[in-house]
Amino acid sequence: MHKKIYIFGGGTYLLLCVILLLIDPSMKAYNSTDLTAPFWYYITISGNFIPEVVTIVILFIAVFLMNRNSRKRYLSSALIVMLIAVTAVSTALVSNFFLKDLFHTPRPSHKIFLEDGFIPSGLDSFYLKNNTFRRNYLTEHVDPKDAKLSGYYSPDVNVWLKEVGGSFPSGHSLNSFLIGILFSYLLFYFLKSRLKYLALIPLLWALLVSLSRYFVGVHEKIDIAGGAFIGMALAFLIVKFNLIDRINDRFILKELNK
């Protein structure tokens, strides 16, 4: 079971890196004329906090329905999903409040605002300010309906205004790979053989969410590769130390000993 998730999870990450290497900068899909812009926008939105909470709820339901070996599956399923949720929230906090401030890497979207004159002071001084200042500054000085921004897909511009943290690492890529790989592992763990192909769906979602961060213009390639690698590494650690297996086996063994 471990070998499968290492192969498929690692393979998904390698595929991401290959695609990022092959993508030409002109392929960014945030211009108003790009037919794929709505697709990538909704994909990137699926990696936001509220959709991820929905994903966690779906994950709990899925684990509960698959975890038929234990009459205590409410508790075991909740603990498994809680482990994933706590890990995801913790890494998101570390990424947003430590790593991004540590590297102070400018986002591509902010470079566009600078080029269009919305950030006249330069990105170095802009990134010395905290997130609250940057968000308030952009809200006050950038009008999404400004003629200078008319060539961009307006929902993407709204994303640019809201996401004001540093660019490295990509938090969406980190969490999507963390959740996607662990969700895939659970499907490999619980599903019957004929349904195990469904385990590829969370990995596909993680791949698309990561790629969307480049196409909507909020991250560079290195940010995405770095974030996805951290998420993959954390997921593999949880699998390596059998944390999910131990939670599930603990309740099964208790019942068998009764």
Image (tube, rainbow, N blue to C red):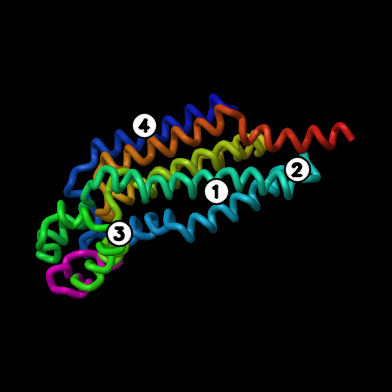
Crowd tier of the residue under label 3, counting other residues whose Cα lies within 10 Å: few below 14, some 14–19, many 20 or above:
some
Residue type marked 2: Arg
Q: Residue at x 27, y 48 (%)?
A: 167
The x, y position of residue 85, in whole percent, is 55, 48
Q: Secondary structure at mark 3?
A: helix
The x, y position of residue 201, in whole percent, is 50, 44
The x, y position of residue 62, in whole percent, is 64, 49
Given contact means CB atoms under 8 Å apart, are the residues at marks 3 and 4 in contact? no
* CA–CA distance in space, label 2 to label 3: 46 Å
Q: Is residue 46 left or right of residue 1?
A: left
Residue holding disc 2: 68
* CA–CA distance in space, label 1 to label 4: 25 Å
Residue holding disc 3: 131
Check residue 176 for magenta coloring.
no
For the record, the magenta segment spans 142-155
Residue holding disc 4: 14
Q: Which mark is residue 85?
A: 1
The x, y position of residue 114, in whole percent, is 13, 59
Going from the N terminus, do you reach mark 4 or mark 2 first? 4
